[in-house]
Image (tube, rainbow, N blue to C red):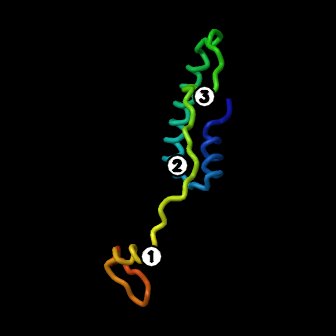
Amino acid sequence: MPNKEFDIKYFSGLARIDLTPEEEERFTKDLNEVLDHFKELEAVDTNEVSPMAGGTGLVNISSEDEIGLKVGVEPLREQFPDEKDGLLRVPKVFD
């Protein structure tokens, strides 16, 4: 079994995340718990279970792209609250 503390340091290095010693300890504990769950799954007898791919049998529904109604500039211009030098202006979001 690999050294789990090394794994935490290795993975945090790959992700370029600096961990405090407390975080390393917590994540090592968390990783141990995840690996323990996998040990439980390995103990399950799956010899009588048929392999499967997917699982739901659902199929994506798609349709052809259609060109919709094109709106000219003038109807849009009428909806804007302000215009300056031919540019449409909107209220500011930040102060």
Image: 2 above or below 10: above
Rendering coords of residue 83 (x, y %): 37, 84
Measuring from the top left, give residue 85's x and y in whole percent.
42, 90
Give how far across and how far down residue 13 sits, in percent.
Answer: 64, 52
| Mark 1 residue crowding within 10 angstroms, few (<14) / some (14–19) / many (20+) | few
Task: Check if mark 1's residue and mark 2's residue have beta carbons within 8 Å.
Answer: no
Question: Residue tagged by mark 1?
Answer: 73
Q: Badge 2 local density, few (<14 within 10 Å), some, or many (20+)?
A: few
Task: Please identify the residue farthest to the right as the structure is shown.
Answer: 2
User: Which quarter of the image is occupied by the C terminus?
Assistant: bottom left
Q: Residue at x 54, y 58 (%)?
A: 67
Total numbered badges shown on the rendered structure: 3
Q: Answer with mark 3 or mark 1, whichever residue precedes in sequence.
A: 3
**Badge 3: residue crowd in 10 Å (few <14, some 14–19, many ≥20):** few
Task: From the viewer's perspective, tell me whether residue 47 is left or right of residue 80.
Answer: right
Q: Which mark is residue 21?
A: 2
Mark 2: which amino acid?
Pro
- Residue 76 visible? The answer is yes
Label annotation for residue 54: 3
Closer to us: mark 2 or mark 3?
Answer: 3
Who is closer to the viewer here, 41 or 36? 41
Q: Between residue 10 and residue 43, name the one nearer to us.
A: 43
Question: In which quadrant of the rendered image does the N terminus lie?
Answer: top right
Residues at marks 2 and 3, CA–CA distance in whole angstroms: 41 Å
Task: Choose the circle earlier in sequence order: 2 or 3.
Answer: 2
